[in-house]
Image (cartoon, rainbow, N blue to C red):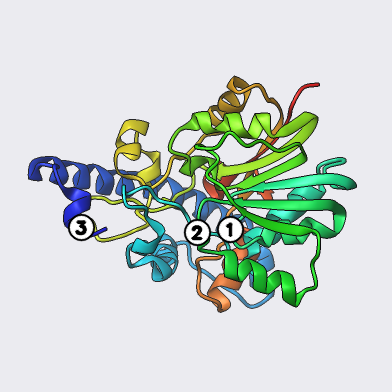
């Protein structure tokens, strides 16, 4: 999808106004975040100094962090990940990404989520990384995807690791009458890509009564736009703080929806689920290039799997139950 197609129909004055709004929000909210980071640096100064690491509070830390995170996202998201109508399909995490291990640990903490008698349904399984991480604790696993973009990677991993209880199925859950009878459902960073949130009906009708479901969605309060946006006059894919703007502005240009804890909780309840918990998943910083800076940032700021600080989290992790 070329830029002329993305920006078609937007008057120049409107494009300039939106660009100014995004940059103003960036400047304003960066100041608030910088104060938080400086406070954290002061708190951790003693243990850091004991290891020979000194950082001045006058260091432009935020600018450094923004530059490093932007390294992997200077270009727009590849066109192959968009459908003909411009709908963004998303891309799965790599097998070695920290976010995969982080989600799995959060799942292991959910009482009775795994079990040798349970059938697992992974909606939007991508390359199967999450499902493969659970397959030994499940009776069987079925992964659903809307395209076969990741099928070859799925099959290579399955064959090389001798996995026999996992299958991949092509299915558009918003256009099918087919339903499953799963004991457990997982669906990570998928709901935001549905053309309509009414697609959650498939989730509800494919889960057995009493069954558990774990989903994650992008967190509105994370400092970067995780799925990218087609913003006029701005060349970046991951614009800082764009997601903090009002929902109508964000959803006009973003490639996917974003959620607060309240919004995703209300959405699941609307479709019949009982929400058991909703927590913030600490940013895994997988976008940072490997090196000492990445190790330092993770160690001192993003080392836990979950957080109570909304703008340290890339996603909201929700566990829900279908009533008996």
- Secondary element at tag 1: loop
- Secondary element at tag 3: helix
| Position above or below: 278 against 46 | above
Mark 1: give few (<14), some (14-19) or many (20+) Cα within 10 Å: many
CB atoms of marks 1 and 2 within 8 Å = yes
Is residue 291 found left or right of 4 in the rendered image? right
Residue for badge 1: 126
- CA gap, disc 1 and disc 2: 7 Å
Q: Earlier in the sequence, mark 2 or mark 3?
A: 3
Tell me which residue sits at (66%, 69%) in the image.
155
Q: Earlier in the sequence, mark 1 or mark 3?
A: 3
Residue 49 in the image, given as x and y percentages of width and height: 64, 71
Q: Which image quarter: residue 163?
A: bottom right
Is residue 225 found left or right of 296 in the rendered image? left
Tell me which residue sits at (37%, 32%) in the image.
247
Q: Which image quarter: residue 65?
A: bottom left
Residue 153 in the image, given as x and y percentages of width and height: 60, 70
Residue for badge 3: 3
- CA gap, disc 1 and disc 3: 27 Å
Foreground disc of the pair 1, 3: 1
Q: Which mark is residue 91?
A: 2
Tell me which residue sits at (60%, 23%) in the image.
271
């Amino acid at each position: 999808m070329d830029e002329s197609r993305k920006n078609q129909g937007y008057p120049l004055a409107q494009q300039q106004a939106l660009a100014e709004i995004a940059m103003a929000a960036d400047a304003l909210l960066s100041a608030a975040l910088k104060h938080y980071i400086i406070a954290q640096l002061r708190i951790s100064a003693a243990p850091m100094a004991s290891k020979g690491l000194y950082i001045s509070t006058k260091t432009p830390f935020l600018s450094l962090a923004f530059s490093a995170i932007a390294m992997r996202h200077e270009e727009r998201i590849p066109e192959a990940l968009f459908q003909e109508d411009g709908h963004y399909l998303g891309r799965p995490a790599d097998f070695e990404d920290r976010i995969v291990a982080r989600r799995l640990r959060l799942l292991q903490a959910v009482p009775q989520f795994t079990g040798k008698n349970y059938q697992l349904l992974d909606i939007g399984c991508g390359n199967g990384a999450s499902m493969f991480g659970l397959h030994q604790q499940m009776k069987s696993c079925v992964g659903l995807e809307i395209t076969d973009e990741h099928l070859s990677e799925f099959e290579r991993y399955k064959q090389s690791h001798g996995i026999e209880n996992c299958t991949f199925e092509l299915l558009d859950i918003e256009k099918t009458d087919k339903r499953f009878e799963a004991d457990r459902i997982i669906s990570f960073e998928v709901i935001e890509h549905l053309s309509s949130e009414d697609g959650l009906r498939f989730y509800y009708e494919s889960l057995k009564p009493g069954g558990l479901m774990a989903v994650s969605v992008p967190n509105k309060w994370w400092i970067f736009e995780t799925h990218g946006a087609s913003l006029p006059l701005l060349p970046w894919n991951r614009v800082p703080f764009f997601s903090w703007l009002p929902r109508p502005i964000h959803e006009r240009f973003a490639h996917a929806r974003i959620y607060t804890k309240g919004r995703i909780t209300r959405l699941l309840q609307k479709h019949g689920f009982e929400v058991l918990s909703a927590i913030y998943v600490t940013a895994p910083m997988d976008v940072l290039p490997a090196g000492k800076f990445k190790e330092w940032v993770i160690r001192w700021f993003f080392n836990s799997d979950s957080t109570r600080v909304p703008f340290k989290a890339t996603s909201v992790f929700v566990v829900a139950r279908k009533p008996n």
